[in-house]
Every structure is written in structure tokens, then in C-alpha cells.
Amino acid sequence: MRTILLAHVKRVVIKIGSGVISNASGLDLDRIATICEDVYKLRQRGYEVILVSSAAVAAGKADLGIVGKPQTIPLKQAAAAIGQSRLMRAYKDSLRQYDLKAGQILLTRDDLANRRRYLNARNTLMTLLEYGIVPIINENDSVVIDEIRFGDNDNLSAMTTNLVEAQLLVILSDVDGLYDSDPRKNPEARLVSEVERLTPEIEAMAGREDTDLGTGGMTTKLKAAKRATLLGAGTAIINGRTPHNLLYLFDGHELGTYFLPARDPMAARKHWIAFTKKPKGKLILDHGAQAAVTERGKSLLPAGIHKLEGSFERGDAVRICDLDGQEFAKGVTNYNSAELVRILGKKTKEIEGILGYQYGDEVVHRDNMVINT
Ligand code: GLU
């Protein structure tokens, strides 16, 4: 029984994959209805529920005569434009049976990468929850361009877990969970029931596969699990095609794969710097500064910067790299690239003399820095 693992859970993000709620001809309304019934029951039990649902593309593509995956981005975007309202309608109709209402939020990565917009999206979600509405999030597929894409809804669900500070992420998939090898190729493959730490060995268990219906394979799910568990949120990957599996999970049944939350969770803001905010440039550090940052927990001072790449503003995220240009941390810079060119390698007390002002001793303060794991 897993009940104990869920004991502290109050708010849960549930990611629903295209492979769960759609088939070759469009949406699977029965599955959506069953999931909504479970959502209702979870809410009855006192959980706050946020849905991240895929299947806009799957719901709209038949109208464009597309079989399989849309082959071009405009076609995918057009299919999503047709399908998104259909998807919401399906949820709204099903939730209405239980006197529940849905609120749609369509996001791009840009919406969360900007701290002000991130906080704004958070406020909207909190307001919906406060009023008992079920938020249903999807990527804004019909307008999004490559540079500002989350890419897949597994990733979006991990970002959402951060956004709402949920204690649990449940990924409803069309497979039973993580297997130690590919179950379609190896009949002996065994389901991994619990993962304490997402090591490279575990990551290697995920093959890379896209299906006609969804974008992510197990690789993107593990990445999402890693990001969510780092926040201190447990993550479950379970088969969402089996009716009421969601409820069974909360009943304490040992189904799917459960990833334990990190023992030493990262603060939501640091997580946002590490995974959501987009880095704009690179700071290359000398060996001494690298050791000070990684081993002694120091802030980054101008003296330790060997050179920089790219152009960025004060407040942007930058990659912090070793002399070979390999990133080992990310951080938010207090100085823009033009200022940094003038003060790099210099002592802290020289900053004001060179620039005529200063924003502090640190180029990247420790509180605004995350060392890669
Ligand atoms: N946002 C896409 C959709 O609604 C799906 C992306 C994914 O499958 O991860 O169709």
C-alpha cells in the first residue's frame, strides 16, 4: 500500500496524454467522462485538482483529413485550433454531470519564463481553485512557435507542478509505467514500481518513441518526473486507459511507477531559474571561481569570470560554464553583458570606479543560482 506516500498531498496536477483520451477518429468521450468522475471523487476527498490535458491536435486533425501525425507545423496548429475547443467542450460536458466547472488556460513557455507573467498565471490558477473551478491547461499550440514551446505536455505538467506548488504529479499514460526494458520487444520486461532517485541507469530504461497520438515517450515523462520530484512533489506514471486507475492510485494501490520526492527539495524560484527561465548567454568561469561556486557555495564575483558570450540584460538568466564552455549551473545576472565586459576579471571594489555605479558585489548572487544536478 502506498497511502502513506500520499498522506501529505493536498494539491495534485494530473497530466492526461493524447493516447489516453483519443483514438484514430478523435476524442474518446467515455474515457474523458471516467476521468472526470474520478476528478469529482478526488475533490470530494478534499484534493485540489489541476488538469494538464493534451489531445487538441488529436481532436481536430480528422477535420483536416489528417491520418497519423500532422506532417507540418501549420497543419498541427490548425488541428489544435479546431480541436482545443472540442476538447474543452468534452471536459465541460463531463464535469457538468458533477456540478463542476472548467476553466481553460493556454500557455506558452514565454508566459512562464517571464517572472511577472508567471506570477500572473499563478494568480489566475489560484483564483480558479479558490472558486472551486477545475483548471484545464494545455500548450497554446495554435500560435506557439518553436522558440517558446514547452515541446510536450509532460514538460508542461512539471512546470505546472512548480507553478501551483502541488505535492503530487500524476501522469496518465497509455502504458502501465516505467519498465526495465521495452515491453513491446522484451516479454520479460518488468514494471519498476518505485524509483527513489532518477539515476542515469533509470533514465536509460526509457526508449525514445513518439506515437501517432502523443508527443512524448517515456523519456519526456522521466524528465518531467525528475523536475517534479526535485520540487518535492512525488510523481506517479500510471495507465490512464484503465478505468478509475486514478482513484485506485489514491486508494493506495500499488500501480504504475511512483517516483519519490527529493529529500532536499529545491525552492520553487530556484526551480524556475533552472528549468523555466530561458538562459540568454554564457559566463565562462576560471577554475578557482568554479570551485568556489560548486564546492563552497559562494556567489559569483566579477573577478572569477574569464569571458562571456551572448548579449543579455540585467535580470536575464545565463548559463554558468567551465573553461571548456560546459554548463554546470544557471543563474540570474545582476549586470548586463555590456557592463560585464568592462568589469570581468576585476575586483569587486573596482566596479563602481569603472561603471560609475554598482548593483552589488555579486554578478550572480547565490540565491539566484542553481547548480545542475
Ligand atoms: N499540446 C498537444 C495537444 O494538445 C499535445 C502535446 C503532447 O502530446 O505532449 O495536442
Image: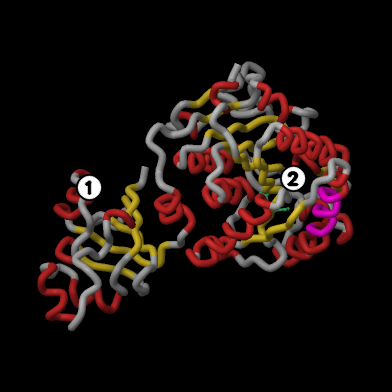
Q: SS at mark 2?
A: helix
Query: Hey, which residue is sitting farthest front in the picture?
Result: 131
Apparent side of residue 249 relative to residue 102 in the rendered image (left or right): left
Query: Residue at position x 22%, y 63% from top?
Result: 362
| Residue 194 in the image: above or below residue 146 | above
Which residue corresponds to mark 1?
A: 297
Q: Position of residue 93 (x, y in %)?
A: 88, 48
Packing grade of label 2 (10 A; few <14, some 14-19, many >=20) is many
Q: Look at the image and give the residue range highlighted in magenta.
A: 84-92
What's the residue type where badge 1 is placed? Answer: Gly
Q: Position of residue 317 (x, y in %)?
A: 38, 63
Q: Is residue 24 visible?
A: no
Of residues 312 and 107, the one nearer the viewer is 107
Q: Is residue 284 visible?
A: yes
Query: Residue at position x 72%, y 28% from top?
Result: 247
Query: Does the residue tagged 2 have its C-beta within 8 Å of any atom of ligand 1?
Result: yes
Apparent side of residue 113 relative to residue 353 in the rendered image (left or right): right
Packing grade of label 1 (10 A; few <14, some 14-19, many >=20) is few
Query: Residue at position x 70%, y 31% from top?
Result: 45
Q: Quadrant of the C terminus?
A: top left
Apparent side of residue 114 relative to residue 304 in the rendered image (left or right): right
Q: To which quarter of the image does residue 77 belong?
A: bottom right
Mark nearer the viewer, 1 or 2: 1
Q: Position of residue 42 (x, y in %)?
A: 71, 34
Q: SS at mark 1?
A: loop
Tell whether label 2 touches label 1 (CB within 8 Å). no
What's the residue type where badge 2 is placed? Answer: Ser
Q: Of the numbered discs in the image, which one, if any, rests on residue 18?
A: 2
| Residue 157 in the image: above or below residue 302 | above
Q: Position of residue 73 (x, y in %)?
A: 70, 64
Q: CA distance from mark 1 to mark 2?
A: 43 Å
